[in-house]
Image: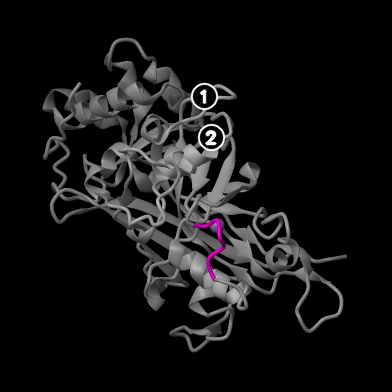
Amino acid sequence: MTTSTPSTSWLDLPVDHPYGLATLPYGVFSLPHEDPRVGVRIGDFVLDASAVAAYGDPGDGPDLAKAWRTPSLNAFLDLGAPVWAIAREWLTEVLSNPVHRERTAPHLIPINNVDLHLPIVVADYVDFYASEHHATNVGSIFRPDSEALTPNWKHLPIGYHGRAGTVVVSGTDVVRPIGQRKPPTEPAPLFGPSMRLDIEAELGFVVGGATQLGTRVSVDDAGAHLFGVVPFNDWSARDIQAWEYVPLGPFLGKSFASSIGAWITPLAALEHAKTALPQQDPKPLDYLLGRDLYGLDIDIEVSLNGTVVSRPPYASMYWSPTQMLAHLTVNGASLRSGDLFASGTVSGPEDDQRGSLLELTWSGKEPLALPDGTTREFLEDGDTVTMTYTAAGQGDSRIALGEVTGTILPAVPID
Ligand code: MN
């Protein structure tokens, strides 16, 4: 089957519209007094996907209308990569061929009229650490007397399993976490609200298609399970993290909330964004090699209370998403539709490309100055962080991957 993307639509969208036919991200929306269901973003509209699937025959059998009439993308993810391709081709046909105009137009809803929901029921969530610049910066800050990169870093994509149940959709407020922290000047741990609340600008990858326990997914088979990408902010309490993480890794400093965008952009929309990886030296073990290795030309813009504070480039990441998935399953761990893994903080080589406040302020030593005259070492109550993502499209165009935003609320008072 071949897929071509028509350059025009009966919607009269400009060819290079960031949410044009070349993008078509999926989300879950609802109208007042109606059940949430799957929608597809086109321009400033949400297409009620199950409605258009119901009147056509997209492909030869998969019941897209049924899968899309559910309050998450999981049923659709479970149908597998061949059906994802059929679905994208059908949506492109419906939105571009004028014969579909009359019956499709009533199912386009202005985006301002809908509520957007968490697009997937997150099955398992893993966070990687795939930026060499980020890992080097954090190593220099946390372990100034050791090599910045740990000895394993260039041999495997380091990761940990996070908390799937606290992944929230963009726009959800984040309550400042409470926990143990032990400043170096204190003889014993203190208990209270985190004083070093941070962000991590990351890219999330949404997985579809279950695998059997005891099997593994190779680099070259990973593409069949990589459905799409989503903006991702891994909120992090640095003081809680620093005290608890030895020797078992991140725990409560991370698990209070992780925010994802409302729109998942299919990998099929990112063909023009694929780039070569940085050279991997030393050469990784064979199970991390294959033909399907790539970086992604995705730019992130991080703003704090409306001021852009960083522009991390995803193209600088060391490991391919296919390598991350191969590593995640190499021990026989099975996949489930709705699995989510994130790249780790995206930090580029330049100072203004760092994806966390930990790095941007060098652990609070170099506070950020904001236009209102205030400074930030870490987040204050009331702060709003918004990360906006774009990817290379055809020619010089860029497609929009949406945003992930959240506002910090004060900690729940301690009795
Ligand atoms: Mn992270």
Q: Residue at x 34, y 17 (%)?
A: 54
Which image quadrant: the N terminus?
A: top left
Tell me whether the residue at label 1 lies in contact with that at label 2, contact meaning CB atoms closer than 8 angstroms. Answer: yes
215 in relation to 175, above or below: above
Q: Position of residue 331 (x, y in %)?
A: 58, 34
| In the foreground, 328 or 37 | 328
Q: Which residues are magenta?
A: 148-153
User: Residue 87 falls in which quadrant of the image?
Assistant: top left
Respond yes or no on whether mark 1 lies under 8 Å from ligand 1.
Answer: no
Q: Position of residue 44 (x, y in %)?
A: 29, 47
Name the residue type under label 1. Answer: Thr
Picture coordinates of residue 26 (x, y %)? 38, 37
Q: Is any part of residue 263 visible from this angle?
A: no
Residue type indicated by callout 2? Thr
Please give the name of the residue rendered at 57% of the width and 63% of the height, measured from the top-left corner.
150
Name the residue at 39% across, 15% down: 63
Q: Is residue 63 magenta?
A: no
The C terminus lies in quadrant: bottom right
